[in-house]
Structure formats: C-alpha cells, structure tokens
Image (cartoon, rainbow, N blue to C red):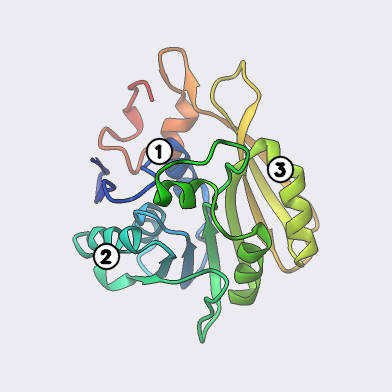
C-alpha cells in the first residue's frame, strides 16, 4: 500500500499507521516560518517529514521513531524522494532523544487512542496506544526546542483540555489551534495545537471542515492541494 503525492510517494505497508487525511492536514497546516531545523517525533512512514521538506527548500529534518520497521520505511521513502539529503531518520525513544542543536520546529502525531481496545498487532498497538506517557513527548519537545521555536501536535478534540494542561505544566504556552470537523454538522473530531516557550499575547483559533456534500470542502482542497495529485481541484470523497 502507499500514497502518491505530487512530488513524492509514501509507501506505508510496513508501517502500523497508514497515511490519512489527518496527516495531510497536519503537514499542510504547520507554519514553517523561517525554521532551519525541524524534528518529527514518531515519524511512522515519514509523511510529515516529507511534507515539511516539500514546503521549505532550506529545512533540515530529523525524523525519529521507536519502531524499527517504521524507521526503515521512512528512510526508504526519504531516499527515493527529491530531498534525501535533507531528511535523516533515526530509531530512537522520545525519552532519550536529545541532539547537540535545538530545533525551530517540532511536530508530533502522538499515540492518542488509549481508550480503545488494545490491538493484537504489537506495532499498531504502539502506534495507537503507545508505551510512553504524554509527558515524555512534551519533555522531549521542550529539551530539543529552541527558545523561539514552536511545537505542534495533532490530538483528539476530546483530549484538548487535558493535554493542554499537560503542555502548560511542562512550560509551554498555547499560540494557535486549528479545530478539525469531518462535516459542518458534526462536532470537532481533532485539533492541532501550536505551542511555544515564550508567553503568547493571544491565541488564534480557526476551524477546518473536511467534507462538504459529496466531496472535499473548498477549504480542505485549498489547504492540502499542493500534495494531492489533482491539486486544489481534487474533489473525490475522502
């Protein structure tokens, strides 16, 4: 299995968690700004690292995951992409990772389904439930983030308040949120939160609806259109 983007192909048959609209929204939304170095925590197939590389010609990206098969597949995906020299993959635990330099941007799609039944497949269980605490991910982000850097994660909307409390307890300040709705008639299912170590004067809260009618919404196509093969005109049902 795999997913063909405009400028790269993602193979994800050996990776527990497959490419999804969640990843495409996340990788499209995260502000790149003037970041020179980025860290992808729990990279999986490497989709986020590749999306960041496509969006910024100057960005150097380190991508880590604790699962050997995921790291191997992420490395293969990076190697055949247009940016093999700008993406480095490592098998590492977030509880241990620390580089000699700090990152201006850190992204994280953490395990966030602890309330669901445990998967009989170990790798999928690790990807969904994880074996680390949320504070481990936050501590890793904090010790590797530059003073003016930004940390982004995507989480279920139902965990919005509880995870915000964890982030604040680890010294982070919320700067922006994107609420993600499947349709306009349903409550938000996911939220992307952006954090920084500097106090924020205000928090920007915006929303995104994925589906409208029989296809994707215009706002979804506009956000993710640089990655779908059909571009911003893509209208197939997701």
Q: Is residue 230 visible?
A: yes
Mark 1 = which residue?
A: 20
> In this orientation, which residue lies closer to the viewer: 229 or 121?
121
> In this orientation, which residue lies closer to the viewer: 228 or 222?
228
In the displayed orientation, state which residue is furthest to the top. 213
Marks 3/2 in contact by CB < 8 Å: the verdict is no
Q: Which disc is residue 160 wearing?
A: 3
Q: Residue at x 54, y 66 (%)?
A: 105
Q: Position of residue 141 (x, y in %)?
A: 61, 68
- Dot 1 falls on a residue whose secondary structure is loop
Q: Is residue 59 visible?
A: no
Q: Position of residue 203 (x, y in %)?
A: 75, 49
- Mark 3 surroundings within 10 Å by alpha-carbon count, few (fewer than 14), some (14 through 19), many (20 or more): some
Mark toward the start of the polypeptide (1 vs 2): 1
- Quarter of the image for the C terminus: give it: top left
Q: Which disc is residue 35 wearing?
A: none
Q: Position of residue 156 (x, y in %)?
A: 62, 39
The quadrant holding residue 232 is: top left
Mark 2 = which residue?
A: 83
Marks 3/1 in contact by CB < 8 Å: the verdict is no
- Dot 3 falls on a residue whose secondary structure is helix
Q: Residue at x 73, y 59 (%)?
A: 167
Mark toward the start of the polypeptide (3 vs 1): 1
Left or right: where does residue 5 sit relative to residue 60?
left
In the displayed orientation, state which residue is furthest to the bottom. 100
Residue 15 vertical placement versus 61 (above, below): above
Residue 188 vertical placement versus 82 (above, below): above
- Mark 2 surroundings within 10 Å by alpha-carbon count, few (fewer than 14), some (14 through 19), many (20 or more): some
Left or right: where does residue 29 sit relative to residue 83?
right
């Amino acid at each position: 299995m795999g997913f063909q983007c405009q400028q790269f192909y993602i193979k994800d048959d050996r990776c527990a968690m497959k490419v999804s609209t969640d990843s495409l929204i996340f990788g499209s939304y995260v502000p790149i700004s003037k970041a020179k170095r980025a860290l992808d925590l729990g990279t999986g197939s490497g989709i986020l690292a590749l999306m960041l590389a496509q969006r910024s010609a100057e960005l150097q990206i380190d991508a880590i995951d604790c699962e050997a098969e995921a790291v191997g597949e992420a490395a293969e995906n990076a190697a055949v992409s247009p940016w093999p020299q700008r993406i480095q993959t490592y098998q590492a635990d977030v509880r241990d990772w620390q580089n000699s330099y700090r990152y201006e941007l850190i992204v994280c799609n953490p395990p966030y389904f602890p309330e669901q039944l445990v998967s009989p497949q170990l790798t999928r269980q690790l990807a969904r439930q994880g074996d680390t605490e949320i504070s481990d991910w936050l501590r890793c982000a904090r010790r590797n983030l530059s003073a003016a850097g930004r940390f982004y994660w995507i989480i279920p909307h139902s965990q919005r308040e509880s995870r915000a409390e964890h982030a604040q307890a680890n010294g982070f300040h919320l700067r922006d949120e994107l609420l993600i709705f499947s349709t306009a008639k349903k409550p938000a299912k996911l939220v992307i939160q952006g954090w920084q170590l500097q106090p924020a004067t205000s928090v920007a809260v915006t929303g995104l609806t994925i589906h409208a009618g029989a296809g994707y919404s215009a706002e979804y196509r506009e956000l993710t259109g640089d990655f779908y093969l059909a571009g911003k005109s893509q209208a197939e049902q997701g």
